[in-house]
Amino acid sequence: MAPMFLGTHNPRLDDKGRVILPAKFREGLAEGVVITKGQERCLYVFPEAEFTRIAEALQQAPMSSKTARAYSRVFFASAHDEVPDKQGRVTIPPRLREYAGLDRDLAVIGASNRVEIWNTQTWDDYLEASEEAFADIEEGDLPEGL
């Protein structure tokens, strides 16, 4: 069964661009991770198996789909893979840190099948702006059964 990532954590980025993954996420990420650009200027951290599943799904899209080509280019070109060290640390490459505006203080959130890494202020702003819309979601706005 695929790991489920939940909760919000606030680790710090060290001087070498490394972040210690929250202890409760480490088991699900121990075999390897792929870090790539996410939407809303965050980073997505996928367990290697989940990244492979998404890659296979994207490969099924027709090459004639302009949207699929554009998404794939950004998604794969910015991807960085590695195995967390014994302390659960991963290095975030400079280009990805710059994309997400990461400084010392981070918000690392569980987002079901992935972990997201946010600049703390960007996450706080996003959450504040999104909570009202979350409260207003009506039946039919989400997939059936939710």
Image: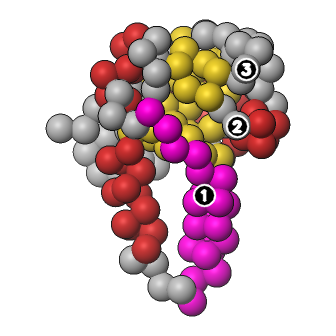
User: Taking the image as drawn, is residue 16 in sight?
Assistant: yes
| 3 lies left or right of 5 | left
The answer to which of marks 1 and 2 sits earlier in the sequence is: 1
Residue 91 drawn at (x, y percent): 62, 28
- Per the image, the residue denoted by label 2 is 93
Is label 3 in a helix, a strand or a loop?
Answer: loop
Amino acid at the residue labelled 1: Phe
| 34 is higher (above) or lower (below) than 103 | below
- Per the image, the residue denoted by label 1 is 75
Distance from the alpha carbon under mark 1 to that under mark 2: 15 Å
In reply to whether residue 106 is colored magenta, the answer given is: no
Mark 3 vs 2: CB contact within 8 A: no
| 45 is higher (above) or lower (below) than 52 | above
Amino acid at the residue labelled 3: Lys
Distance from the alpha carbon under mark 3 to that under mark 2: 10 Å
Disc marking residue 16: 3
* Mark 3 Cα-neighbour bin, 10 Å: few <14, some 14–19, many ≥20: few
Distance from the alpha carbon under mark 3 to that under mark 1: 24 Å
Looking at the rendering, the stretch of residues picked out in magenta corresponds to 64-83
| 53 lies left or right of 35 | left
The answer to which of marks 3 and 2 sits earlier in the sequence is: 3
User: Taking the image as drawn, is residue 127 in sight?
Assistant: no
The answer to which of marks 3 and 1 sits earlier in the sequence is: 3
| 63 is higher (above) or lower (below) than 79 | below
Q: Nearer the viewer, mark 3 or mark 1?
A: 3
Mark 1 vs 2: CB contact within 8 A: no
Q: Is 106 in front, or is 52?
A: 52
Residue 106 drawn at (x, y percent): 68, 17
